[in-house]
Image: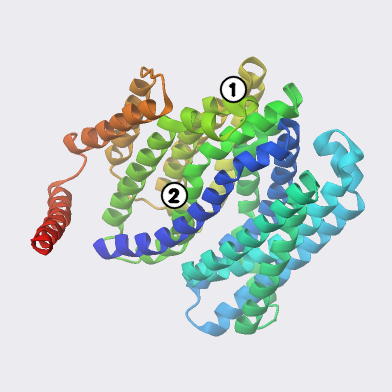
């Protein structure tokens, strides 16, 4: 059990550090972007980015998730290489067709997304970017399957540095506006895709196996419904907001959503990248059930702590880093963070579905949640605008978590201890509600007081009996070791001074 936790922490921490770097740079540049972009520009960029993300999900998920699954099914390098090469060729062909469509019918796509054909140049740029992103995704899935977390983070960092340098130049010097950001992303994507594709092909070869393609497609095609549903749950609210309000409202909501989405970037996505491969190995262990259950508890506790800490101070953070017209963005952040708490729990509960290969459950689950989310958006957004959008997302992800548990248990029973999930979730909600009673005249004082609330959350977990005796004993050993080292350092320093 301890060895499995170490492996997850090793690779998960690498992925997390990469995402932290990515998001940290992005958040540090929020004052820069909000200076050169209006709220309407921010909304335009958000809708375009989400549109290409949707198409990318539909093109990528059906091959990439299947690639990782089948990579571990084959034992020899020949079959593994054929599976990777087949996925690369199939994804490239599908992406080329869609990208050409976007280039030719850019005006119609612009009219559909942004209610005007005048943004067609932006559509053409993102159509080109889509092609390289899809090819890229297969190479990254190959690295994930091989558990090469450092390589993935390195390539993402290179892309980030190049893209940001181009964005700063094109926005601040060339004054290009939204299209400058899109061009910067395209150029950096071309660079990374070229390097990764050459490396991947040199290792796996270039051959198409029809039998393996059918196997990959059979596993992955139900995930198209899941991918669409995931997009709808995560991002469809922006389009409803545009319909019922305007691009400026979308821009403010998008900024707040980026902060709430940090929980996904910091924890859930890094965890998914390693757990998507590790869960198949864990399932082969004799103690698979207890391992699955304990990891669920640790994962939930960590998500709750991060989500709570972020929600406590977000009002003060946004008031410092963003212009006045963006300040109301803080209101949606705690609800969005709660949404991704439910999302992370739901993702983990899907493990049994993937292990049993009964991916049709994911399609069914996604369809149900997507329909529910549409209904909630239509019901809540006209009445509550951005807050309605946030709560529609939270309730939809809660439904997804419940369905994931029910369907997964039916497909592959895992003896979860649900109290390990519910206790930290309830404690975090109570702690946040208490924090809303805090009123301080200055940002530093408010952050200090809310810090005490976070400490209170940790203490509540410790006294609630959440940790069993062995975990408590292990925690005391670690604390004693750290304290002993600290005391030794103090003594050494004293002897040196004497």
Nearer-the-camera pick, 451 or 409: 451
Mark toward the viewer: 2 or 1: 2
Residue bearing the label numbered 1: 388
For label 1, the crowd category at 10 Å Cα-Cα, with few meaning under 14, some 14 to 19 and many 20 or more, is: many
For label 2, the crowd category at 10 Å Cα-Cα, with few meaning under 14, some 14 to 19 and many 20 or more, is: many
Q: Quadrant of the C terminus?
A: bottom left
Q: Looking at this rendering, what residue extends furthest in the top direction?
A: 383
Provide residue 154's location: percent of width, then percent of height.
Answer: 54, 67
Residue appearing at x 33%, y 25% in the figure: 430
Residue appearing at x 59%, y 30% in the figure: 372
Residue bearing the label numbered 2: 267
Identify the secondary structure beneath mark 2.
helix
Provide residue 326's location: percent of width, then percent of height.
Answer: 62, 28
What is the number of the mark on residue 372?
none
Q: Earlier in the sequence, mark 2 or mark 1?
A: 2
Nearer-the-camera pick, 25 or 300: 25
Up/down of 300 relative to 59, above or below: above
């Amino acid at each position: 059990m301890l060895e499995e936790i170490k492996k997850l922490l090793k690779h998960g921490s690498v992925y997390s550090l990469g995402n932290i770097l990515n998001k940290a740079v992005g958040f540090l540049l929020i004052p820069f972007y909000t200076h050169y972009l209006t709220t309407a520009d921010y909304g335009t960029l958000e809708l375009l980015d989400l549109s290409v993300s949707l198409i990318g999900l539909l093109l990528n998920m059906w091959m990439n998730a299947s690639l990782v699954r089948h990579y571990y099914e084959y034992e020899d390098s020949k079959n593994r290489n054929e599976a990777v090469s087949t996925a690369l060729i199939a994804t490239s062909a599908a992406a080329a067709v869609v990208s050409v469509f976007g280039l030719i019918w850019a005006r119609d796509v612009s009219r559909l997304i942004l209610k005007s054909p005048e943004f067609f140049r932006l559509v053409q740029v993102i159509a080109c970017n889509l092609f390289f992103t899809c090819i890229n995704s297969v190479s990254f899935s190959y690295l994930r399957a091989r558990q090469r977390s450092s390589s993935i983070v390195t390539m993402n960092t290179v892309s980030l540095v190049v893209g940001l340098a181009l964005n700063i130049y094109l926005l601040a010097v060339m004054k290009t506006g939204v299209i400058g950001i899109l061009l910067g992303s395209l150029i950096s994507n071309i660079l990374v895709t070229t390097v990764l594709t050459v490396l991947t092909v040199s290792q796996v070869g270039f051959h198409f196996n029809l039998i393996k393609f059918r196997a990959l497609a059979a596993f992955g095609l139900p995930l198209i419904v899941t991918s669409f549903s995931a997009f709808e749950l995560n991002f469809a609210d922006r389009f409803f907001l545009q319909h019922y309000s305007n691009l400026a409202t979308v821009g403010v909501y998008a900024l707040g959503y980026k902060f709430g989405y940090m929980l996904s970037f910091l924890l859930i996505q890094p965890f998914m990248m390693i757990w998507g491969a590790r869960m198949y190995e864990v399932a082969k262990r004799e103690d698979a059930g207890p391992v699955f259950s304990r990891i669920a508890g640790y994962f939930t506790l960590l998500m709750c702590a991060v989500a709570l800490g972020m929600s406590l101070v977000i009002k003060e953070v946004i008031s410092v880093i963003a212009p006045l017209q963006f300040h109301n963005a803080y209101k949606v952040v705690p609800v969005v963070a709660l949404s991704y708490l439910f999302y992370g729990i739901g993702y983990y509960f899907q493990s049994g579905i993937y292990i049993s290969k009964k991916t049709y459950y994911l399609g069914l689950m996604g369809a149900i949640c997507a329909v529910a989310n549409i209904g909630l958006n239509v019901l809540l957004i006209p009445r509550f605008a951005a807050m309605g959008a946030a709560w529609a997302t939270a309730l939809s992800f809660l439904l997804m978590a419940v369905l994931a548990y029910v369907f997964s248990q039916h497909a592959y029973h895992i003896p979860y201890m649900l109290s390990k999930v519910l206790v930290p979730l309830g404690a975090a909600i109570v702690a946040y509600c208490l924090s809303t009673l805090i009123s301080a005249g200055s940002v530093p004082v408010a952050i200090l007081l809310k810090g005490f609330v976070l400490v209170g959350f940790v203490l509540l977990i410790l006294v609630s009996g959440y940790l069993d005796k062995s975990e408590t004993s292990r925690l005391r050993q670690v604390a004693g070791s750290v304290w002993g080292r600290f005391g030794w350092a103090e003594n050494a320093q004293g002897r040196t001074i004497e």
